[in-house]
Image (cartoon, helix red, strand yellow):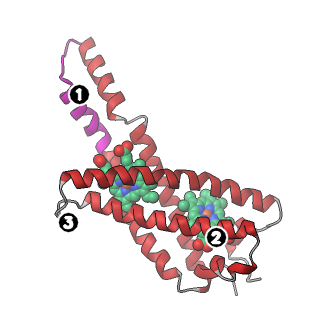
Amino acid sequence: MKKWRLDFRVWHWIHATVILGLLGTVFLRKTFLSWRANSELITQKLSEINIEVTSDQAKGLATAIRAPMWEWHILLGYAFAILVLWRLLLFFTQSGKTNYQNFKEKTLHKKIVALSYIVLYAVLLFMAVSGLAIHFHEALSLTKDTAHDIKEIHELVYNAVLIFVPLHIIGVILAENRDEKGIISNMIHGGSQT
Ligand code: HEM
Ligand code: HEM
């Protein structure tokens, strides 16, 4: 029997891609497509050709430039919410449980890794629920203030994802090069149950 069933591997790689995509949209929103930076640029460049705009007008233009990019956050967000549900279903399969069984027999390192995955899953569930709540706040009859508060927490908790992703990638590369040969390729071809 394979360690990672085909559906688990497909889930892992789609999930990894979608999360990297979501982080990409956040990166763009906070850098090249930041409304603060771009509204200053717009004000300055327009004034060079003798067009004066108010700060609200410049902000409107900057957010309009950002909007098509940010639609990807929402589209990837829907995909991500489905992936979270898919992962919950995978807990009913052997591959989905494998890292969380025989906890007592695990080395301290493996215990920490398993716990970090559990914490991450809780974080991801929160990101999906809070993201959907912000996006559908009107349909859910949430006030703008509540939606704003949820957004602040969504943004704060995002830091946990930002920390996990590089640690995870560096972690599996180190493991591959030390005492867990094949850990990465197992997630590609499935490996075998030991
Ligand atoms: C792109 C480079 C990546 C590589 C090479 C990679 C590789 C792996 C490997 C080898 C495992 C199995 C490790 C083990 O058994 O402890 C794993 C598990 C996992 N990966 Fe990744 N991963 C990558 C990206 C990501 C990303 C971006 C995420 C998103 C947060 C992610 C989330 C997870 C999770 C949650 C598990 C635990 C699966 C379980 O519940 O057992 N991975 N990854
Ligand atoms: C791991 C998954 C996710 C991450 C890392 C993430 C990250 C973020 C971050 C950092 C922000 C704040 C951006 C800023 O103001 O600079 C944000 C805002 C937002 N996110 Fe997410 N998000 C995730 C999932 C989702 C999901 C599933 C949805 C729903 C479809 C969603 C919808 C939103 C919305 C509506 C905003 C507010 C945008 C605004 O105020 O204009 N997010 N997200």
Q: Amino acid at mark 1?
A: Ala
Q: Which residue is mark 2?
A: 114
Q: Residue 110: percent from the left, percent from the top?
A: 71, 69
Q: Which residue is mark 3?
A: 140
Does the beta carbon at disc 1 come under 8 Å from ligand 2? Answer: no
- For discs 1 and 2, the disc positioned in front in the rendered view: 2
Q: Which residue is mark 1?
A: 58
Does the beta carbon at disc 2 come under 8 Å from ligand 1? Answer: yes
Q: Which part of the image, by quadrant, shows the N terminus?
A: bottom right
Tell me which segment is drawn in magenta: 49-67
Mark 3: give few (<14), some (14-19) or many (20+) Cα within 10 Å: few
Secondary structure of the residue carrying numbered label 1: helix
Q: Amino acid at mark 3?
A: Leu
- Is residue 26 something that shows in the picture? yes
In the image: residue 131, left or right of residue 120: left
Disc 3 and disc 1 in contact, CB within 8 angstroms: no
Q: Residue at x 25, y 39 (%)?
A: 64
Q: Nearer the viewer, residue 91 or 183?
A: 91
Against 118, residue 105 (above or below) is below
Mark 1: give few (<14), some (14-19) or many (20+) Cα within 10 Å: many
The quarter of the displayed image where residue 33 is located: top left
